[in-house]
Image (spheres, grey):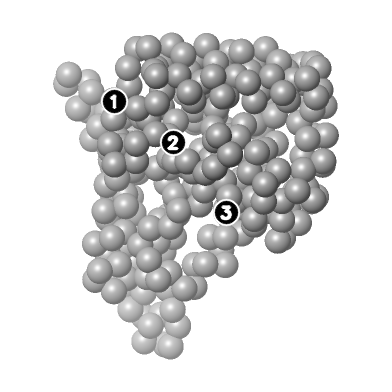
Amino acid sequence: SAMGRACAISFEEVTARTLKHLIDLSKPLRDDIAAKGGHAHIVAYGYHGTECMMEGEYRWQTYAPYLQGFAKKALEAVAEDAHGDGVSVGVFNAPEILTNSSGIFVGVELPLYRLMLAIESEAPALLNDVRAICGAKLTDGEAGLAAIRTILQNFHRAPEVKFLTTFEDWPQHNTSDQMTLMINSAADLRSLHKDGNDLITVDLSRLVFQACGHIMLHQSDKLDAPVYWLGHDIVAKALAQNGIAAES
């Protein structure tokens, strides 16, 4: 539809073209920095699905493949083109987190719950603290955490969602059945909390944000690739190496 095309243009502008504008307009500044012996690096982040712990192994999946997916691909293309021209730029594909903007897309936070499984595998020393923080927000503590696993397992095993786990096919458009299952599963997870407006995904988001920020900051001076992938395994390892969870 015309409205859909307008949305596509808007998403690409705010997602991909902002990076292109920054690269183009900052060239005089970057050249000046280089002339003085310095180095300039440009860092961006995007969401292109995440590798989560599923069925005992890390598998790529994506949250709702809504229209922004095409803009995310365009963002990566901008970085790839600039990197090929010698610009030090990198897009970090980070896991989705609960933010003021993503919060209006009900269900996009579902994969975030799986971060606890990655912490269990990659950062067991932090697991008890994370489980205690999360369990305190649930009406039934340990039983609630077990219920979360069951809901997620049923969700990602459902045929309505399985088509979202083929990396080569992304981005794809939503389906009514997929959206219904996602929204209902999100509601089931919310019902396990003492306060439906205070979800454990808030705390898990904070961990992802801090871990990804640490990785991006420390990698920014050696951007040897235009696109980086920060799966739940990498996030959990960063938490373990830097003790970020304990500080939260």
Q: Nearer the viewer, residue 26 or 55?
A: 55
Q: Is residue 189 left or right of residue 111?
A: right
Which kind of residue does numbered mark 2 sit on?
Answer: Gln
Name which residue lies at 43% across and 57% down.
228
Residue 197 in view here: no
Which mark sits nearer the N-terminus, 3 or 2?
Answer: 2
Q: Amino acid at mark 3?
A: Ile
- Tell me if residue 240 can be seen: yes
Q: Position of residue 178 (x, y in %)?
A: 39, 17
* Residue furthest to the left: 2
From the viewer's perspective, tell me whether residue 165 is left or right of residue 139: left
For the N terminus, the image quarter is: top left
Measure the alpha-carbon separation of dots 3 and 1. 28 Å
Residue pointed to by mark 2: 61
Q: CA distance from mark 1 to mark 2?
A: 14 Å
Q: Residues within 10 Å of mark 1 (few under 14, many from 20)?
A: few
- Residue appearing at x 60%, y 35% in the figure: 114
Q: Residues within 10 Å of mark 2 (few under 14, many from 20)?
A: many
Q: Disc number at residue 173?
A: 1
Picture disc at residue 234: 3
The three-letter code of the residue at mark 1 reads His
SS at mark 3 in the image: helix
Q: Earlier in the sequence, mark 1 or mark 2?
A: 2
Of 196 and 14, the residue lying toward us: 196
Cβ atoms under marks 3 and 1 closer than 8 Å: no
Instruction: Please determine whether, in this image, residue 56 is positioned above or below residue 102.
Output: below
Q: Nearer the viewer, mark 3 or mark 1?
A: 3
| Mark identifier at residue 159 | none
Residue at x-position 72% and y-position 23%: 146
